[in-house]
Image: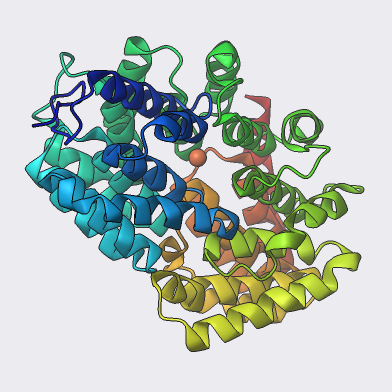
C-alpha cells in the first residue's frame, strides 16, 4: 500500500527506512547543506525502484539550470516513468511535471507541481519546486501565492514548517510586503538557526529597504549559520551589496577575493552568477578590477553556447565582454542565442527573446563604449525585466546599467528621470543620490547637483 513521508504525504514505497532516507536528503536540500543528490544516489543505488527517490533527484536537478546535468536529470525522469505502473497519483503528478520540464515547458512543469500541491498541501517537495521555479522564471506573484495556498493549513506541528515560512517570506519580500516578510523570515530563523534561505529572505528585505548598516550587522552576526552552507556565495554577494552602496569598495573586493573568486574552475554556474553580478556593479562604479574579469570569463567559457537559461547567458556575457581574450566567446553566445530564438520553442525562448538577448547586446555595447546604443536597447524593455527570472535585487543591474549608460551617453535629461525613479524606490541609498547628482551636473544645474551630492554624503556619514 505504501507508507507516507514525515508530513503524512503518501508514497508507493513500503520501506520506511527508504522514506526516512529520502526525508533526510530532502531536508538537506531545504537547509542548503551537504549533497542531497549524492545522498539520494546512494539510496537509489541499492533501491532502483524507489519512485520518489527518482522524482526527488530529478526535481532537485531542475533547479541547476545547466546543460551539463541535463542527461543525468533525463535518466532520472525515464527511470521514474518506467516505474509509473507502480506509482500513486501524487508520484504520477511529479513524473508528469518532470517530463514536462525536460521537454522544455518550464511553466507547464510548475502547473503540474501545483496540481499535486492542491491535492497534497503538505507535499513540501512540490511546494519547494513550485516556489523555486517561480523564482527562476520570474513569476513574482507565484513566488508568494504558491505558498499562500497552503500556508493556513500548516503550523509548527508539521515537520519542515520553518522552510515553508522562509519560502513565504521571500515571496512576500519580492511582492514588497517587507514587514510581513521579515517577520516570517525571523520566525523561521528562530525555529531553525541554521537556515540559509530564511537569512536570504531577511537580507533581501534589508536590501530593498536600504538598511545597509543593519544588513551588515545581521549577516556578520549570523555568519556561522550560513557561511558553510550551499547558499554561501549568494549570501556573501548580498553582504557585499550593503558595503557597495556605502561606498566601501575595498571591503567588497575583499569579499569577492576571499569568498567568490574561486581559484579553480568550479563548474557551478550559481557561484559564477554572483561573481559576474558583483563585478559588473563594480564596473558601473568605475572600480579597478585587475585580472578578475579574465579569471571569471575563463570559468564561463564552457557554457558560451548553452542557451538553456537566459539568466545564465546574461551573466556569462558580462564576463566575456570584459575580457579581451573572450571576444569570440561573446560572439558565440550571441550567435547561439540568435539561432536558438529563431528555431527552438521551449519556455526559455520567450525569456531570451524578450530580455536575455537585448540585455546581452546592451552589455556588449556598454563594454565597447557605445552607450547610446546600450540605452536604446534597454529603454524599451526596462519594465519587462522580471521575465529574465531571479530577484528584484539581481535584476536591478539592468536598470542601473541603463542609467549609467544614459549618463555616459550624456543623455542627462533621461538619466535624471531614471535616477529619480531609483531614488524614489530607495531614498536612503547613497549611490542613488550620487547618480541624481551626476545627472543634474550634466544638465548644468549645479545647485541641485550639490544638494543631491550632500544628501549622498550625509547618508554615507550616517
Ligand atoms: Fe538573493
- Residue 184 position (above or below residue 221): below
Q: Quadrant of the C terminus?
A: top right
Residue at image coords 36%, 33%: 47
Can I make out residue 65 in this image?
Answer: no
Question: 19 or 449, which lies in front?
Answer: 19
Question: 21 or 446, which lies in front?
Answer: 21
In the image, taking residue 120 as reference, residue 293 lies left or right, namely right
Q: Quadrant of residue 166?
A: top left
- Counting labels gives 0
Where does residue 143 sit, x and y in percent of width and height? 30, 47
Residue at image coords 63%, 49%: 269
Where does residue 229 sit, x and y in percent of width and height? 56, 24
In the image, taking residue 451 as reference, residue 196 lies left or right, namely left
Q: Quadrant of the N terminus?
A: top left
In the image, taking residue 88 as reference, residue 310 lies left or right, namely right
- Residue 380 position (above or below residue 166): below
Residue at image coords 13%, 41%: 149
Where does residue 387 sit, x and y in percent of width and height? 41, 65
Where does residue 280 sit, x and y in percent of width and height? 72, 54
Q: How is the image coloured?
A: rainbow
Q: Quadrant of residue 408?
A: bottom right
Can I make out residue 226 in this image?
Answer: yes
Question: 87 or 123, which lies in front?
Answer: 87
Taking the view exactly as shown, the residue that stands out farthest to the bottom is 342
Question: 249 or 125, which lies in front?
Answer: 125
- Residue 208 position (above or below residue 374): above
Amino acid at each position: 500500500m505504501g507508507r507516507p513521508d514525515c508530513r503524512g504525504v503518501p508514497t508507493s514505497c513500503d520501506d520506511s527506512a527508504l522514506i526516512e532516507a529520502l526525508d533526510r536528503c530532502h531536508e538537506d536540500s531545504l537547509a542548503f547543506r551537504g549533497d542531497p543528490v549524492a545522498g539520494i544516489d546512494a539510496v537509489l543505488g541499492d533501491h532502483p525502484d524507489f519512485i520518489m527517490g527518482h522524482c526527488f533527484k530529478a526535481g532537485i536537478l531542475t533547479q541547476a539550470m545547466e546543460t551539463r546535468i541535463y542527461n543525468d536529470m533525463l535518466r532520472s525522469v525515464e527511470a521514474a516513468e518506467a516505474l509509473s505502473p507502480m506509482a500513486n497519483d501524487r508520484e504520477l503528478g511529479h513524473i508528469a511535471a518532470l517530463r514536462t520540464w525536460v521537454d522544455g515547458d518550464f511553466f507547464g512543469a510548475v502547473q503540474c507541481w501545483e496540481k499535486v500541491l492542491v491535492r497534497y498541501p503538505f507535499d513540501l517537495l512540490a511546494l519547494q519546486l513550485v516556489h523555486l521555479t517561480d523564482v527562476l522564471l520570474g513569476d513574482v506573484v507565484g513566488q508568494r501565492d504558491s505558498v499562500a495556498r497552503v500556508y493556513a493549513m500548516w503550523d509548527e506541528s508539521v515537520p519542515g514548517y520553518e522552510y515553508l515560512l522562509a519560502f513565504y517570506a521571500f515571496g512576500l519580500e519580492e511582492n514588497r510586503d517587507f514587514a510581513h516578510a521579515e517577520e516570517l523570515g525571523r520566525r523561521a530563523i528562530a525555529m531553525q538557526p541554521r537556515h540559509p534561505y530564511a537569512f536570504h529572505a531577511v537580507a533581501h528585505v534589508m536590501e530593498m529597504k536600504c538598511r545597509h548598516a543593519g544588513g551588515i550587522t545581521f549577516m556578520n552576526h549570523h555568519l556561522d549559520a550560513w557561511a558553510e552552507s550551499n547558499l554561501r556565495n549568494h549570501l556573501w554577494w548580498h553582504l557585499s551589496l550593503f558595503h557597495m552602496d556605502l561606498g566601501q569598495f575595498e571591503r567588497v573586493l575583499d569579499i569577492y577575493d576571499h569568498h567568490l573568486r574561486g581559484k579553480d574552475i568550479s563548474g557551478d554556474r550559481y557561484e559564477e552568477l554572483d561573481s559576474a553580478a558583483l563585478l559588473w556593479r563594480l564596473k558601473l562604479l568605475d572600480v579597478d578590477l585587475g585580472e578578475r574579469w579574465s579569471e571569471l570569463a575563463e570559468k564561463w567559457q564552457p557554457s558560451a553556447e548553452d542557451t538553456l537559461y537566459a539568466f545564465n547567458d546574461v551573466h556569462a556575457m558580462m564576463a566575456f565582454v570584459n575580457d579581451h581574450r573572450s571576444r569570440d566567446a561573446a560572439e558565440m553566445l550571441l550567435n547561439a542565442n540568435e539561432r536558438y530564438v529563431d528555431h527552438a520553442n521551449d519556455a526559455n525562448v520567450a525569456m531570451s527573446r524578450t530580455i536575455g538577448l537585448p540585455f546581452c547586446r546592451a552589455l556588449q555595447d556598454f563594454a565597447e563604449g557605445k552607450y547610446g546604443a546600450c540605452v536604446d536597447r534597454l529603454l524599451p524593455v526596462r519594465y519587462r525585466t522580471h521575465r529574465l527570472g531571479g530577484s528584484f535585487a539581481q535584476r536591478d543591474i539592468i536598470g542601473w546599467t541603463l542609467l549609467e549608460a544614459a549618463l555616459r551617453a550624456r543623455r542627462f535629461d533621461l538619466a535624471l528621470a531614471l535616477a529619480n525613479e531609483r531614488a524614489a524606490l530607495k531614498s536612503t541609498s547613497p549611490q542613488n543620490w550620487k547618480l541624481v547628482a551626476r545627472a543634474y551636473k550634466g544638465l548644468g544645474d549645479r545647485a541641485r547637483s550639490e544638494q543631491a551630492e550632500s544628501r549622498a554624503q550625509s547618508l554615507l556619514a550616517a
